[in-house]
Image (cartoon, rainbow, N blue to C red):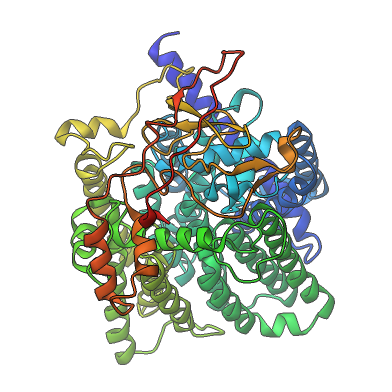
Amino acid sequence: MTSISLLIASHSAIIATWALVALMLTGIGLLYRRFFTPRELDAQEMLLAFWTGFAGLLLVLQVWHLLFAVNAAAVAVVAALGFLGIALERASLLAWIRARPWHGWRLGVLLTLALLAWAANRSTGPIAHYDSGMYHIPVLEWSKEYAIVPGLANLHGRLAFNSASLLYAALIDHGPWSGRSFHVANSLLLVMFGLQAVLAWTRLVSARSRPQAADAFDAVLFLPVLAVLVGGEISSLETDVPVALILLLAASRIHRSMTSAGSTSDLNRWHFAAVALLLGAAVCVKLSAVVLGGVLFLVSLAVFRHAIATHARATAGAIIVPVAMGIVWMARGVILSGYPVYPATVLGQSVPWRVSVVQANAEAEWIRMSGHELNHNRIVAGYDWLVPWAKEIVTDIRFAFLVPVPFLIALAFGLAAFVRGRRRPPSDEIAESPWLLMIPVGIGVAFWFFASPHPRFGMGPMWLGAALTMALWFRTIQGDDAIRRRQMRRVGATTAAFSLVAIVALAVFSKGGTTGRRAGGVKAIGGLVFLPGPDHGLHPMPKPVLVSYTTSSGLKLAVPKDNNLCWRGPLLCTPHPAPNLRLRNPSRVGDGFILDDGVWEPIRWPNPWTPFLPWLACRRTDNAIPPGVARDRACIALTANLPTDTLDRVTVPLTLGDPAGPRRMTRPKPDPVSR
């Protein structure tokens, strides 16, 4: 095939898969919606149905995976649920289609086509996100081969981070998309989120509709979509993007209900049920969402209080479903690690495979340290990280669009809204004050900053603040709809110009790929569009370079030679092999893993080049200096010149086809400081 043919074929395959999966998820959402309201559909309701379908899918897959692998049977069951929802709502869907909701919205159609084409092209690109090679892809492979495996954290701690979005990726990773789901899983979510922003801009500037503050809220969120499109996250299984999109979508629905008058009780009950389900799903995708999600849920209780008070049964159902999802998710955590919310050690259960408290605490400390040092594998004490962190989030264009840009937008429009609001009252009537949403913004930003301030973790609360201040500013515009449209056209033109500059800047100056090298100057602008790759027009997943390691029990493991990346290697692959690891049942891998004596002594944790584990041991045991920053700095100096943990003496090259298998090896006794 020619390059043009490969380009067309790969883009068409991606867009067709998006359409099929989106239809399935929308059907699941419509099925859930039937329990709360039979109202007619519009564009906003269709988008909300997609996202509630995605959240419902995560519940279904988590329950399924307790008993079965995420195999072809799971695909059939989920597809049946989706198309059942479509069939039951066919009358409402046909009425919505006949109404031609896109008629007269040329801007919306053009933006949609541009978004689909560019997102499809970016989705064909190589997978560059480091964590996808370290544990996202391995979790996907385990999910496809086995029902949930007890003690998987003993093999590799990050396999127990329990992100439900990886089950969704595993569902897609079948048939022609086997080994290729990273091209379509996250990108579909990003496209559907982008469509909401497209719809908002269309309503803001079109004479066929009345612009609303909720549309201004959604319109701002097209900027993080563009940032992700240019970055490498769209062609990956990164969990930070889905959780941020879900949180922003839930906040958008809450804000729309706060600023819309005349909604009926049954519609508000449905919106409350949708928000509750989305927030439950966000926590199941990533534990870090629990604080912002929890505060948003409390705000939703206040916003929808009248609707939920009038129908106890519907309200109970709306709360029970996400609570059930959370219970299933925590049960999965216990099976994977012995802890419901690993790496947190609260409510640890006395199961034989429970990982060491030392391991769980070390995982949490490394996440915090990585956030402080922006994954540079440096060790710092106290607030020594703050100045270098601040400099990098301003100078690295990737990080700028996750923290400084939304902060500046929030600051500018927030001040404008405050000044205008003091001079004149808001121009639209609302049921609640949107300023109430500043509470979750403030709490979410504070939690992110003090827990682990990596910019990608702050995408949700930072852009929520930007969207909210834009909506508050919009409400201060006085006059008729024509004046509002004229104001928003100016904002739109400014945003488009800013976006063009931002896209070029991201391409030219951003760091990317697993090497972290800069993109290469002006020539990098060409990288905004991918040429066809060697895998039917797609760029394939990297292949790991592995060596073998045999534990004291005779269990043979595959280990990445020079890094932490297992990619799609053997299932028994770990970057941190433990010499005392064994199978609970020597004849069945699916029965799980356990450490013989319960002592955690991994090789090369957290990576082959950072003395983080000796530093942790030093700060726990050095009693010559009182605990605190002084001790931490002393331990940094003490461990800085220690040789990094290595596999050189305990490994041989991995030969998967060798019937004799690798020879058995033992690990030398570790240096006392590493204990």
Q: Can see residue 523? A: yes
In the rendered image, which quarter contains the C terminus?
A: bottom left
In the rendered image, which quarter contains the N terminus?
A: top left
Residue that appears at 58% across and 56% down: 285
Q: Quadrant of residue 383?
A: bottom left
What residue occupies the far left of the structure in this picture? 521
Near-viewer residue (225 or 247)? 247
What residue occupies the far top of the structure in this picture? 1
State how many labels appear: 0
Residue that appears at 49% across and 85% down: 433
Near-viewer residue (214 or 31)? 31
Q: Would you say 39 lies left or right of 436 here?
A: right
Near-viewer residue (129 or 20)? 129
Near-viewer residue (106 or 564)? 564
Residue that appears at 66% across and 50% down: 151
**Image coords of residue 230 (percent x, y):** 33, 42
- Residue 659 higher or lower than 615, as above or below: above
Q: Would you say 21 lies left or right of 230 here?
A: right
Q: Quadrant of residue 544?
A: top left
Residue that appears at 42% across and 82% down: 427
**Image coords of residue 187 (percent x, y):** 49, 41
**Image coords of residue 26 (percent x, y):** 68, 48
Q: Can see residue 70? A: no
- Residue 383 higher or lower than 52, as above or below: below
**Image coords of residue 315 (percent x, y):** 77, 76
